[in-house]
Structure formats: structure tokens, C-alpha cells
Amino acid sequence: MRFGMQKKVAVVQSNYIPWKGYFDLIRSVDAFVLYDDVQYTRRDWRNRNKIKTAQGELWLSIPVKNRGRYEQLINEVEVSEADWAAKHWKTIEMNYRRAACFDQMELPVRTLYEQASEVARLSSINQLFITGLCALLGIDTPLYRSEELGRSSEGKNQRLIHLCQALGATEYLSGPAASSYLDEAAFAAGGLEVSYMSYAGYPEYPQLFGGFEHAGVADYYSSRIRTHGATPEGVDWNGSASQQQRFAQLLKLVPVEEQRAGFSLIDVGCGYGALLTWMREQGLPVDYHGYDLSEQMIAAARQQHPADDAVRFEVAESASRQADYAVASGIFNVCQNTARDTWERYIADVLRAMDACSRKGFAFNCLTSYSDPPFMRDYLYYGDPCFYFDLCKRTYSREVALLHDYGLYEFTLLVRKSS
């Protein structure tokens, strides 16, 4: 089946009441495809989302049937409890009745929940909310379902190319995280230009209950440092020996001659400054800048290391200056209840920032997906080392080293920039 001529197309799995960037993506294209004839992933945005309350973040999850259905597609997932919609609306009403524009939005949003209560499949529920909210936002982009456009039996890239071609597209607009796996040459061979959506620059606006994004992780580490003090346990490591082993891997980024002569370094998610302590114990002459989201961590770091001309700590989401190198130790491990695709988008954003703030290269570590399953924990993120090696090799430098042989259930990547 072919439809009328379109120019720019986006293809994305459906989410439950998606974030603002999702609707911005829909607004930015000529046709939008709900990509729901692919495998359903648990603990993801397909059937759940967060709201803010006076007591903190709260998950709203649509209960679904998944026992024994491990390979079901998104468009096959069925709701397991009939009263979920009434419960969700009651929670939203209770927490947002005093929010700006609630009186204006109450009836149309409540109507969507009433309609959703009559729908059996998750994909159709998500489509109902997406189309309804698009109407409220004045977005008139046509929405299609991927199963309407025919199915290609080939790989991930070819499926996307097929969907774009079925709509007569000349350009495929993707989210930024896909840059690591999209085969742009294959898209070009199919007559398609690939471009990437930018989610930067959204203005802040007054809202209830304070900040939101990454608050759970910052609170987690603030609680750790309050409980355990400036110790490895305070940043959720199991001891100083393994912590120092990690630091030794990261500092392999810096050539020996520079370690002797002096270098500058940005410590992303610096915690209480343990890396700086270790470098000073090694006698390394370093101009150091550490930043962290947790005010308690930075307070502990400043207490451990009174500032001088070569040391600076700050509470920040990103570096305020450049340095020779940037490193990040352990900051990608604790994801709490964050959905995997959102956490990986966060990691991709941090890597871009590390690339931007470093002149000669950057390094980071991450728990490995090759960890033994009995020891893996739901609140931790386990990355695929091959995926991140490929991402860094294709995106940042040809000089990338993967270290996965130092006895811990993690890996370290060193990205050296060509001189």
C-alpha cells in the first residue's frame, strides 16, 4: 500500500502520555509512524510514565498481560485490569487540580481516559492519547501504524527504509540516540536523507512541585553521602581497592609523559573528589575541575579538598570550561526506575558533552551486560560494551580502546582524539 507523496517521516514506538520532545518530533515531520509491530520491552515507556507530586515522583503504569508472553509485539499487548484508567485520572486530578490551565484541560483529558478505559490493547490506548493530545496542541501531522504499511523481513535499517518508502519520503528524521546504529549509506541507497532531531533549548516554565529530570538519581547519591560520608560506600562502590582500580583504568587515557609534565582534567559526576585524592597520592600534577548534580557531594568534596588555583568543584549539570581530558566514573550505573531508552539517551548526551569539553580525549566506565545474571540488580544499568565501542568509534574518534580485562563486572572506554 502506498500513500500520497510525503517528504519528511519519523518512525517511533508508541509511548504512554509521551514527553514534550515526542510531540515536537511529530510536529516536525510530514508523516509520523507508530512503530508497534516490534517486540514489547518491559520496564519501559510503552506502558508507564511519571508525574510529579508533593511527595516526589510517582509512576503511572498501565497493567498489562506479560506472563509467558516474552516475545509479544507492542501491538499484541493487552491490558490486564479494567479500572486502571479511572485510577490514573483520579491521581492526575488530585495532584494537578491547582496547576495552570487545569480547568481548561480537565474535560478533554478526562474524556481521553474515559475512552481509554474501553480499549483492550496497549498500542491502541497509546495512539488514542497521542492523537488526542496532538489535537489539543494543534498538531495535524498524519499518523500511521507500521502494520498498515507492510512488513519487510529484513533487518532493522531495512524495515525503517521500507516504512519511509511506503510513504514516499525523501528524508528520515530520527532521534539523536539512533546515530550509533543507523546505516546512513543504506538509507541513501534507498533515496532517503537521514537527519537527527535536537531536543535542546526547551524553555523552562512554572510548574508544581519543583524540578524533575534526573532528580531521583541526584537524591539517591545525596542520601548515600549523608549515610556513609566521604567514603567509597558514599558513592555506592564496595571499597577503595576496586575504586582505585577503576581510576587506574581511566587514567590510561593520559600519556605517561603528560602525567609527569602536567595536564588538565574534568571529572564528570565527581562525587566527593575521590579521583582527585587518588591522583594526588600518585603525585600527578593536574589542573582539576569536578562537577556533580548533588549539592551534598560537592560540599563533601570541598571539605576534602579546599580550593586552590588548580582545583575547582561546582554543582552543575555540565562543565563550564574545557580541559585536556574528561573522565566519568560510575555515573551511568544507578538508573533507578528510569526506562532504558531514556537512560541511554542521557548517556549519549553526557558523552557528547564530554567530547565537547575535552581537547584531547575522554574516558568512562560502565557496568557490563556480560555480568552474571544472578548478581544483576533492577536499579542498575548494564551497558553493552560493543555498542558503546561502536558508538564512540563511529562518532568521536578512530582511536578508541575498550578495556574489559581488569577483573570487575564493568568495562572502560578510552577515546583519544587525533592530533
Image: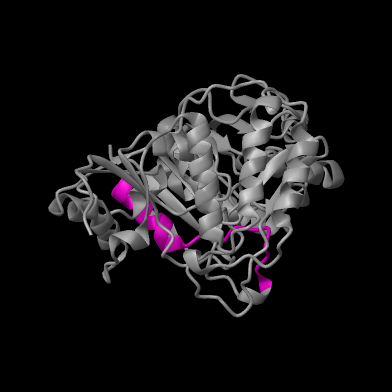
- Left or right of 2 on screen, residue 408: right
- Residue 189 placement: quadrant: bottom left
Using the image as rendered, state which of residue 133 and residue 28 is in the foreground: 133
Membership of 358 in magenta stretch: no
- Quarter holding the N terminus is bottom left
Q: Position of residue 264 (x, y in %)?
A: 49, 30
Residue 365 visible here: no
Q: Position of residue 23 (x, y in %)?
A: 47, 37
- Left or right of 50 on screen, residue 357: left
Residue at screen point 51% across, 65% down: 40
Give above or below for 336 relative to 275.
below
In the image, the segment drawn in magenta is 375-398
Name the colouring of the figure. one colour
- Left or right of 1 on screen, residue 409: right
Residue at screen point 48% across, 37% down: 134
Q: Position of residue 411 (x, y in %)?
A: 51, 60
Give above or below for 99 relative to 179.
above
Residue at screen point 55% across, 44% down: 18
Count all numbered tags in the image, as a single digit.
Answer: 0
Q: Position of residue 401 (x, y in %)?
A: 38, 55
Using the image as rendered, state which of residue 229 and residue 187 is in the foreground: 187
Residue at screen point 71% across, 35% down: 294
